[in-house]
Image: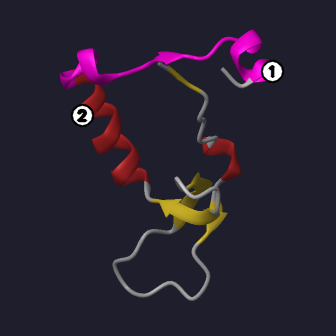
Amino acid sequence: MSCKSTIYKKEAVANEGRKFGSAIEYFPCWIARMDGSEVPALFTQHQIVEAIERAAANPEDVPEKANWLQKVFNV
């Protein structure tokens, strides 16, 4: 299985209406559900760091990154 997803840290959005102790910014993405619908998601810097650490600790579970042909032909 290949992975087509990317979260771009350069797309950070400010946390409007920020409460004390909450993240200053979020990293947005869209989650495609099994039924084809999509929902927005916001990740904090801490959540991204935690996910990177989890992937490093479990490399056997990380799918290979999709190449451009896989992205174009959706395979």
Residue placed at 44% from the left, 58% from the top? 44
Place of residue 32 in the rendered image (x, y in percent of width and height, measured from the top left): 59, 53
- Cβ atoms at labels 1 and 2 below 8 Å apart: no
Residue indicated by mark 1:
72
Determine if the magenta segment contains residue 62.
yes
Q: Where does the magenta region start and end? A: 57-73
Quarter of the image where the C terminus is located = top right
Residue type beneath disc 1: Val
Residue 56 sits in quarter:
top left
Which mark identifies residue 54?
2
Residue placed at 42% from the left, 20% from the top? 63
Work out whether 2 lies above or below 49: above
Which mark identifies residue 36?
none
Helix or strand or loop: what does disc 1 sit on?
Answer: helix
Work out whether 27 lies above or below 23: above
Residue placed at 61% from the left, 65% from the top? 40
Relative side of 10 to 3, left or right: right
Distance, label 1 to label 2, CA atoms, is: 29 Å
Q: Residues within 10 Å of mark 2 (few under 14, many from 20)?
A: few
